Amino acid sequence: MFPNSTILGPLFWIVMGGLYTISFTGFYYWITDSIIKMNWWKWLLSILWFLGLNITIAGGFTLFGEKEIRAGFWFLSVFGGVFIVLGVGLWRLLTSR
Amino acid sequence: MIETANSSKKGNKLFALLILIAAALLILHLCMQTAELNPTCSKSNKN
Amino acid sequence: MMMKKKYRDLIIVSGIAVMIILAAVYGKRRDAETQKELIEAFFPSSQYHIERVNGNKWKLSSSNLLYSGNIYIGEGKGYNGAVSIMVQTDHQGRISQLNIIANHETPSYFQKLKINNFLKTASQVKIGDYVSGEPIDAVSGATITSRAIMQGIRNGNTKGENIAVSNSFHPSFGILEFIIVALLIAGLILQVIKNRKIRRTIRWTSLIVSFAMLGFVYNQPITLSRIVAILNGHFPDIRYEFYFYLLLGGSIMAIIFTKKNIYCRSICPFSAAQEILAKTGRAKTFHTKYYRRLKYLQWGFTLGAILLALVLNNPGAAQYEVFGAFFQLTGTVILFVVLFIVVILSLFIYRPWCNFMCPMDGVFAYVRMIRNMISK
């Protein structure tokens, strides 16, 4: 990822790991504080959605990295669109009742 | 159409704007498609 | 007041009709290229000697007499109009060159044939094999165009050589036709049933059937380029596309007899897609003070596209729907961007494509206007 440096790569992933932790715990506290009632399948779906979104972004940017700019845009827009729609649907599911 | 209470909402202006953007893009699409359909281009389908 | 509205409608209806006729006449005038000119564009007279045998066959020999063969010119029925094919064969009937000399197909679909090397595959078969049927597989997603090319080869060969072929004009009634009849009946039933629960069941069943079958499996909604093709005098092949006549005829009849546009309400696969997205995002009907203006923009856009395509004598030029992009991932980059906007909008406002962009809305509104005028 950083061809001219040996230290930036590991640092980047440490920061990414930190961000993931913060976002997970942040989401957890926010959701338990709010009126939304969570149960096991809601958690499962949320995590699956989040993983899918991550894979989409990672896949899209991998394609950019491999100089497949066109394919990257297609990948991001098609799967990104699908995940936005799924996200709205999931949000409705979480907030229903 | 009857104007409803939320017709001045900010969100609705955004929606109308998005529709207009889509319409503008469709015009662009028609222009480009017409250029591509130009007979001098479509005739060179040699194998 | 009533009188005034009547005259206004009359002016609009006849004005649009006059514009369409003028555009069609103008477009047809530009179409005046002779066969000989076409052939000479491919085989220059300095190198080849061509001799007309009949309206479909020409004899070809090179000036140094080393080569001799035939040229056949035939037509097939494509999606938006006739596809003219020129086939060059040697004296044993092997195809040495296959050219599409005129077509009106939508560019992004035509592109599929090129990607799949369809012309190359088609020219590896002897011309005689086309007489009895379709020797090679159609490119999926561009079936009508592939079929039109094979039909064009057969047409040129059989007419050029006076080979008798049995032309059956039996329309095929298959699964697609059955689905369309069922959807039309469901749409009509919805107009009379009052019970909300039954209505909902019928409506959602037909939406999902249309979404899956008309959308993903067959991908055959009514498109504007098809309407323009008909205005331009090209009628789809009834043997293969009987469903289209059922769909268009049924929808127009429904407007005439029930005043209701059942096509847009419950048959169109993309309206089903938007309905599902609206359910997902709990979309609301978009009431705005700009509503009228946006509506006029939509209808004006449709009229403009129709006139443009007629003037260019090329129905494919009027294609701006996002159906192909949504159901088949076929379309230009711009159409995909529009589709992206439409999909996101559909989550928040009810049916943005149908209400503010779709060309069929204008076409059916025009049909209804004529109907209302006559019935008064």
Image (spheres, coloured by chain):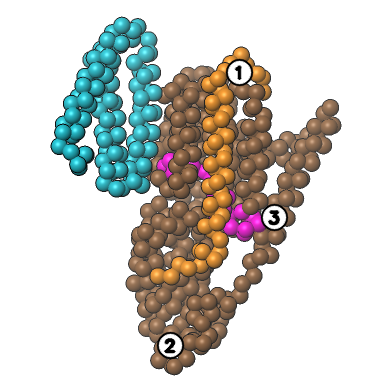
Chain colours: A cyan, B orange, C brown
Asked if the residues shown at circle 2 and circle 3 are in contact, with their CB atoms under 8 angstroms apart, the answer is no
Q: Which residue is mark 3?
A: C23
Question: Is residue C234 rendered to the left or right of residue C341?
Answer: right
**Mark 3 is on which residue type?**
Ala
Q: Is residue A39 above or below residue B28?
A: above
Considering the whole magenta stretch, tell me its main secondary structure: helix
Residue C207, x across and y down, in percent = 46, 32
Residue in the foreground of this view, choosing between C55 and A34 = A34
Q: Quadrant of the image for the C terminus of chain A?
A: top left
The subunit letter for the residue under badge 2 reads C
Residue in the foreground of this view, choosing between C155 and C306 = C306
Name the outermost residue toward the bottom. C64
Q: Which residue is mark 1?
A: B8
Q: Secondary structure at mark 3?
A: helix
Question: Is residue C136 rendered to the left or right of residue C85?
Answer: left
Residue C217, x across and y down, in percent = 39, 44
**Mark 1 is on which residue type?**
Ser
* Callouts 1 and 2 on one subunit: no
Q: Residues within 10 Å of mark 2 (few under 14, many from 20)?
A: some
Q: Is residue A36 above or below residue C76?
A: above
Q: Which residue is mark 2?
A: C68
Segment tinted magenta in the rendering? C309-328
Q: From mark 1 to mark 3, how far is it between C-alphas?
A: 41 Å
Q: Quadrant of residue B34?
A: bottom right
Q: Quadrant of the image for the N terminus of chain A?
A: top left
- Mark closer to the chain start, 2 or 3: 3
The subunit letter for the residue under badge 3 reads C
Q: From mark 1 to mark 2, how far is it between C-alphas?
A: 76 Å
Q: Quadrant of residue C137?
A: bottom left
Q: Is residue C94 above or below residue C75?
A: below
The residue under the point 37% across, 83% down is C92
